[in-house]
Image (cartoon, grey):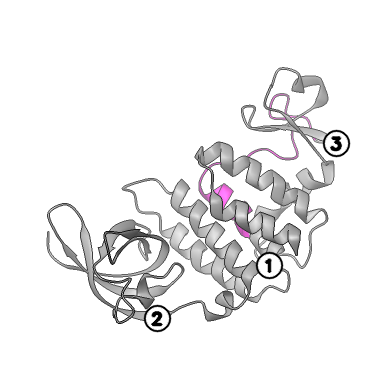
Amino acid sequence: MPDLDVRGIVLARKDSGESDRRVWILTEIGEVIDAIAKGSRKVTSRLAAITEPLSFADFHLAFGKHRHYITQGQLLASGRQLRTDYDRLGLALAFAEILLAVLPSGKAHVEAYQLCHLALEALETHERPLIAFLWIQSRLMSLSGFGPSYDRCAVSGRSLTESPGWFSMSAGGYVSSSESGQFTDRVSVRGEVLIALARLPLLDASPANIKFADECLDLILFQWRHITEKPLPALQAASDALRMS
């Protein structure tokens, strides 16, 4: 396989070997490339900056026996504003974690790349980063095909008229009280939270505020855990940090 030049965003990294990093790059055509950056954990490495999570860069990749290797690159943006605010950085890392978990392996998804740029911009500039995070999560739910029914009963199709209501992942979203008994994974959710999450993906930009935002975050976390079947430590850490602050 010939060498490859790609532009993309680093979604995640982890240590590999004594001084290397393994990184996952979301490219501008929506592919996720798993690559090794040799020696990038060394202080003097020219690859150190471009292999940080959320770095936007041009990468030159060589293909070895079994995988890609990053041989050089040019940093285009590092998300400096995000890195100066702990809450914003935590939410951005949580978004990248979820995006990597839900993107289909081996398939290109251009909309995911565009959404990633939109997410980082919103999280960097919004006065309340949690609100931007909830909005971008609702967009990701819709984009990835996991968007549940929030304001109509997933069983009967009737509109939400109660508060609290019930939410079940196995049902596909909100279930009315009369239908909820058959779903053992149901959780009680305030009606205003369900209505807010139903409206969010319809907005072209993040709203200034959302009532009961912390409860909206709880339901988002609940959903992603079931969808990905993974612990999602970055999302949990960001959620915990927001509660403490």
Examine the rendered structure and indicate whether residue 78 appears above or below residue 88.
below
- Ranked by sequence position, the earlier of labels 1 and 2 is 2
Q: Is residue 186 left or right of residue 57?
A: right
- Measure how far apart labels 1 and 2 are at the Cα level: 23 Å
Q: Which residues are magenta?
A: 136-159
Query: Mark 3, residues whose alpha carbon is within 10 Å: few (<14), some, or many (≥20)?
Result: some
**Quarter of the image where the N terminus is located:** bottom left
Q: Which quadrant of the structure image shows residue 203?
A: bottom right
Q: Amino acid at mark 3?
A: Pro
Q: Which residue is mark 1?
A: 129
Q: Secondary structure at mark 3?
A: loop
Q: Is residue 43 left or right of residue 142?
A: left
Mark 2 to mark 3 CA distance (whole Å) = 47 Å
Tag 2 residue: 76
* Residue ID at (34%, 79%): 43
Q: Is residue 40 above or below residue 190?
A: below
- Splitting the image into 4 quarters, where does residue 47 fall? bottom left
Return the residue at label 3: 164
Q: Main secondary structure of the magenta part?
A: loop
Magenta-span inclusion, residue 137: yes
Q: Is residue 198 left or right of residue 224?
A: right
Image location of residue 187, percent across then percent down? 74, 32
